[in-house]
Amino acid sequence: MQFDAAVFHDRGAASASAWCFAFVEGQLLLLQEQQSLTPQPATLFDAGGLRRRHYLGRLEGLDCWALQLEQAPPGWQALPLRAAMMALPSPLLELAGRAAQVLEWDRTHAFCGVCGTATEALAQERARRCPACGHQVYPRLSPAMMCLVWRRGAAGPELLLARSPGYKPGVYSALAGFVEAGESLEDCVHREVAEEVGVRLRPALRYYGSQSWPFPHSLMVAFSAEWAAGEIVPQAGEIEDARWFALDALPGIPPRFSIAGHLIRDLAAELAG
């Protein structure tokens, strides 16, 4: 499915039906019976107490809208964004994440962070500007690195996986952390791995890919790296457990809707081959 992103809508070319990513109290609305999304008349949600409305672009020629409502219309069910995204096919899950981030940015920047004046939406770009002091804000993005560490063990390749206290029981993942001010992605990878599990990496990092992650507004940038030295020492309060796993004895790992799920499966398959 081809998605063409756009910030503003040509009112003269509105599609008869549209993809509507509607939210109530931060939860995404799905059709109650099918637990899915299908194109709907763009005016369907007007009776739901429309608070915010943003144009996203076109998917297969149909308009895409991000909507914030006061209540769900009959026949629609509000689900937590993560659960809803797991139920959606690509690219609908990516668009749901995009919609959530745009609406959250709009909600949290209704007032100027400098002087407190109500901000105004700009006509020519997706931004809000303070009419009093001129401070201008754009949708926020927080870059975060992810790194899957591996080594050549005595019995074959092994992956270093860890879990935080908030993870689902039995599930382990790659290491991750936010980029600090003044820090490159590469610097962040080496620092976070050292902080979280106490090991050092070989200098050469291998870029894997990136994923927009709307919890609430992250951009996950994923790498793999080979272990160089050090014993695992989990960071207190951050890492509940971390260990080396043989490729044929991996624990529960994230599903494929997250980049972590793809990274772990793909590197394991590559090392096994």
Image (tube, rainbow, N blue to C red):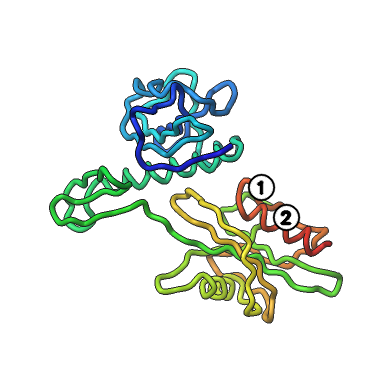
For the C terminus, the image quarter is bottom right
Location of mark 2 (residue): 265
Q: Is residue 170 left or right of residue 66?
A: right
Q: Residue at x 62, y 59 (%)?
A: 163
Q: Position of residue 88 (x, y in %)?
A: 59, 35
Q: Nearer the viewer, residue 251 or 221?
A: 221
How many residues crowd around disc 2 within 10 Å: few (fewer than 14), some, or many (20 or more)?
A: some
Residue 113 circle label: none
Residue in view at x 45 percent, y 30 percent: 20
Q: Name, please, the residue furthest toward the front.
A: 12
Residue 87 location, quadrant: top right
- Residue 270 in which image quadrant: bottom right
Among numbered discs 2 and 1, the one appearing first in the sequence: 1
* Residue for point 47% across, 67% down: 179
Residue 197, compared with residue 8, is above or below; it is: below
C-alpha distance separating marks 2 and 1: 9 Å
Tell me which residue sits at (56%, 57%) in the image: 210
Q: Quadrant of the N terminus?
A: top right
Left or right side of 77 for 111: left
User: Element type at marker 1?
Assistant: loop
Give the residue type that dot 1 points to: Arg
Callout 2 amino acid: Arg
Return the mark for residue 256. 1
